[in-house]
Image (cartoon, rainbow, N blue to C red):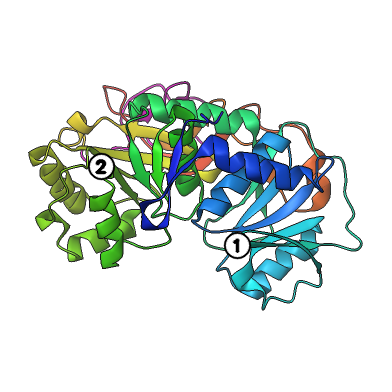
Amino acid sequence: MFNLNSILIGKNGHNFLLKNIIEESDLFINSFLKKRELIFFLCNNTIDSISLYVSFINKGVVPILINSDLEKSLIRDIIEKYNPSFIFTPITNQNYDFKYAEFLTYNSFLVLKSANSFQIELNSELAILLSSSGSTGSPKLIRISYKNLLSNAISISNYLNLNSDEIAITNLPMNYSYGLSIINSHLYVGAKIVVTEKSVIQRDFWELVKINNVTSLSGVPYTYEILKKLRFFKMDLPSITYMTQAGGKLSNSIIEEFANHCRNKNIDFFIMYGQTEGTARLSYLNPNKISEKLGSIGKAIPGGEFRLINNNNETIDSSKIEGELVYKGENVMLGYANEISHLSKASELNKTLYTGDLAYRDEEGFFF
C-alpha cells in the first residue's frame, strides 16, 4: 500500500526516499524477526518510527502502536497484558523498567527482547493494534487489518484528491488513528511528509510549514481553538491548499470562522467524522457545503455507507428522525482485543460498525 517514491523530509530539510530508508529498516528487522511476531512499538513522529512502521507492515510483523511519551505505568500494563516478543523504544526512553533485556539498536531506537514471551498464532488479516483512545494506555485494543488500512487510505486520497505533489506535516501523533491515516494516505499516493515532533504552538513548526511549502494542515477541535488564539487568520501561508478537522465536534462558530478564512484564501476546509474502530475516517463534508450544512458531518467516505437505526434495531428511512449511526465499509476493524488470545480471532463485525453516536439525516442525505 506504500508508494516507494514517497519522500520523508527530516531535520534540516533532508529528503529521504521511502524506498531507500525502508531497505535499511527491512534489513534490520529481517536480521532477527524470522516469523510473524507481536511487538510493542513506542513510536514518535520521527523518520525512524515511520520507516520501522512501513517495514513492520511489509514483513507481516504486528505492532501495538503506543505514544512514546505515555505514562510508564500505563505502558507497563499493556506489556503485561499482551507479553510481546520485542519492544521497540526510542533510546531516550531507556529509563523505563520494562524487565526486558537490551537486544539491539537501530538508529534512534533500542530493541528489547523478552526472555519468556508467550505467543499465540496471530490472525492472518491482523496488521496493527491501536489503543481504543489515541491518548490513553487502555489495554483494550482495536484490531486493524491490512485491508482496513488500504481501503481507508484509498478513500481518503480519493475525496481529498491527493497526489504526489502534496506535502503533509506530522502535527498529530502517529499512534493516533487520525495521525496515522495522514501518513498512510500520503504514502499511498507517493507524496511528501515533513516529519517533526514540533507542535502548532511552536514557532519552529510554522517555519517548517513555510520552508517546505506544506500544502495541508490537519487537527482536532483543540488544534483549531489553539490556531484561533495564535492569530492563524493573519498568518501568510500561501502553500496551504486544504485543511481537515476530525477527532470530535468543532463548534459551529469556529467552523464558520475557518470556513470563511479558507474561502477567502482558496483553501478547501474539510470537516470529517471518524472513529479508530473505522481505521480513522468515516465521513466528510464537501467544503462547498459547509455554510449550507453547518454542523453536518457530511456523507460517508467513498466505499462506505451510513444508516440510522432505532431502539428496536430497525432502519430509519425518514429524514430528521434521530437514531444510532451505523457505518458499513471495508475500513471497519476486525474487532476489539482485551487479552492476547483475542489476537487470533477473525473479523467479528462483518464490516459493520455501530458507532454509539446519535445522528439524524436531512432531506438531501447529509448527516448531523
Q: Main secondary structure of the magenta part?
A: loop
The three-letter code of the residue at mark 1 reads Ser
- Whether 308 is among the magenta residues is yes
Compared with 6, 95 (above or below) is below
Taking depth in this image into account, of 21 and 318 the one nearest to the observer is: 21
Q: Quadrant of the N terminus?
A: top right
The three-letter code of the residue at mark 2 reads Gly
Q: Residues within 10 Å of mark 1 (few under 14, many from 20)?
A: few
Q: Which of marks 1 and 2 is in front?
A: 1
Q: Residue at x 77, y 42 (%)?
A: 30
The location of residue 118, given as percent across then percent down, is 90, 54
- Residue 38 relative to residue 121: left or right: left
Element marked by disc 2:
loop
Compared with 348, 340 (above or below) is below
Q: Is residue 148 visible?
A: yes
Taking depth in this image into account, of 354 and 15 the one nearest to the observer is: 15
Element marked by disc 1:
loop
Disc 1 designates what residue? 108
Q: Which residue is drawn at 50% across and 32% down?
A: 326
Disc 2 designates what residue? 295
Q: In which quarter of the image is residue 172?
A: bottom left
Q: Residues within 10 Å of mark 2 (few under 14, many from 20)?
A: some
Q: Give the range drawn in magenta.
A: 294-322
Upstream in sequence: badge 1 or badge 2: 1
Taking depth in this image into account, of 166 and 99 the one nearest to the observer is: 166
The location of residue 49, given as percent across then percent down, is 57, 53
Q: Quadrant of residue 351?
A: top right
Q: Quadrant of the C terminus?
A: top left
- Whether 283 is among the magenta residues is no
